[in-house]
Amino acid sequence: MRWAGTGGRPWWRAVAALVAGALPALAFPAPSLWWFAWVALVPWLLLLRSAPGGRRAAFEGWLGGAGFMLAVHHWLAPDLHVFVVPLAALLGLLWLPWGWLAHRMLSGGPGRALAAVAVVPSGWLMVELVRSWQELGGPWGLLGASQWQAAGALRLASVGGVWLLSLLVVAVNTAVVPLVAGARTRRTGLAGLIVCALAGLLVSRFAWTPEPYGTVRVGVVQPGVVNGVGGAGARFDREEELTRRLAGQDVDLAVWGESSVGTDLAAEPGLQRRLAALARETGAEVLVNVDARRSDRPGIHKSSVLVGPDGATGDRYDKMRLVPFGEYVPFRSALGWATSVGEAAGEDRRRGERPVVMEAGGTEGRPVLRFGPLVCFETAFPDMSRALVRQGAELLVAQSATSTFQQSWAPDQHASLGALRAAETGRSMVHATLTGVSAVYGPDGRRIGRPLGTEARTAAVYEVPLAAGTTPYVRLGPWPVYLALVVLAAYAGTEARAAVRASRRARRRPGTRGAS
């Protein structure tokens, strides 16, 4: 049996590429084998190295990329059904040139294999950059995000963000390939690993250390799954009951999850009065999330709304980055049929226009707390939390809901992103959900207290540290991406010069057309 498109090679290479591409998914939650990420790409890279040509390697790069995207996003299948397969295949095309590049660099001599430690990770980072575009699904499953539990990696994230972690993880994988490929290339692989270690140590010298200056007490309200007729009202009732338990616990801010309120508060003054009563009873403003058609402008919005003792404070943030298919259908005129095969949005939600930094406290002797809200999917975007901190946010607050995916890896994967955003920005992050997993992370990215799993229906109070100072990542932005572009440009220039020299030598050979 032969596989079409593999140039007559056995079908097992195609299957091996799919499986090898899927392996890095084990480094993410729920398995969370973070250490595995440092070698998870090796089988795929060895396969690309052994390909009989660049075209085959590109084909196996595409298959591996499709396998990776399918494995990391497999929990979308209940919503997207069969559509998840062509979606993974489409996104897998981004790895097609990377497969060709990996083959060319790793199948050459020792010098080229050593250069691969810089070039191959740079190519991978370009793939991650392109697929981070919201219309292509956003930056969910960036390889560096698998390191959310590793203290050393989180320190590096304060310098170069998740982009630096992806670059280093792929570099180590690339260096391991010549180390295990054979005796002839082991020295090259060892040299590559030494270079990676020295680079990591050098960058770690610039890692940011939190400068604590106080704490705030944040109450996270997680009502659990509430379905059926009247679900929105029943959910509100349960959230109200749980929030009352925060009274007397000296809470500075109470946070509800995404879509915690199903009616626009301006159109339902009764709900607003109930929330104001909760703020008076607990002594803290309540941050809710309204998923409803607005009364003051057209369309459905997902909005973080802060409610104080006297009602809505006027602080409101409309979600800017929407979930493809879940909250809108990209290119609806062409892909609207997706609503008939899955649970894609029947009506596109409207986008917000700008990030908002809100203020809580400032009364009864409480200091003002400036915090930046994010809604669900937005925690995957490093630039959004960075922008909020640059605007003066002392705390990051994410409101989320993964009720559709309770029995999958999604809740754990989503909660883990808070660790990266906290470490990158040097600001604690509260990740509050309707149905779990809710979690809180300190300014160094380490988890604070116990997370609330998907089985929890409770209100929990966390003592959240505040830190001053600015991390290198907040100051400089995604500089590893620019570094990768420079590496790839240098590589392209080197290849172009080599091609020109080869062409000139060919013209000078006796018997060659144009030779004297």
Image: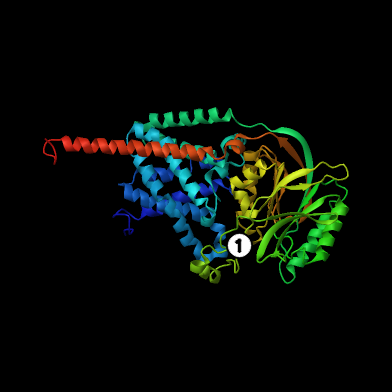
Is there any visible trace of residue 125 in the rendered image? Answer: yes
Q: Position of residue 20 (x, y in %)?
A: 44, 49
The residue sitting at 51% across, 70% down in the picture is 337
Looking at the image, residue 321 sits to the left or right of residue 220; the answer is left
Q: Position of residue 461 (x, y in %)?
A: 79, 47
Looking at the image, residue 276 sits to the left or right of residue 470; the answer is right
Q: Position of residue 314 (x, y in %)?
A: 77, 55
Classed neighbour count for the residue bearing mark 1: other residues with Cα under 10 Å, few (<14), some (14–19), many (≥20): many
The residue sitting at 43% across, 31% down in the picture is 192
Quarter of the C terminus within the rendering: top left
The vertical placement of 141 against 331, above or below, is: above
The vertical placement of 275 against 511, above or below, is: below
Question: Residue 321: which quarter of the image?
Answer: bottom right
Quarter of the N terminus within the rendering: bottom left
Q: Position of residue 124 (x, y in %)?
A: 46, 44
Closer to the camera in the image, 397 or 342: 397
Closer to the camera in the image, 503 or 412: 503
**Scheme of colours in the image:** rainbow
Question: Residue 506: which quarter of the image?
Answer: top left
The residue sitting at 35% across, 37% down in the picture is 493
Is there any visible trace of residue 434 in the rendered image? Answer: no
Looking at the image, residue 213 sits to the left or right of residue 93; the answer is right
Closer to the camera in the image, 55 or 485: 485
Numbered circles on residues, count: 1
Query: Which amino acid lies under the numbered mark 1 shown in the image of this protein?
Result: Glu
The residue that disc 1 covers is: 327
Q: Secondary structure at mark 1?
A: loop
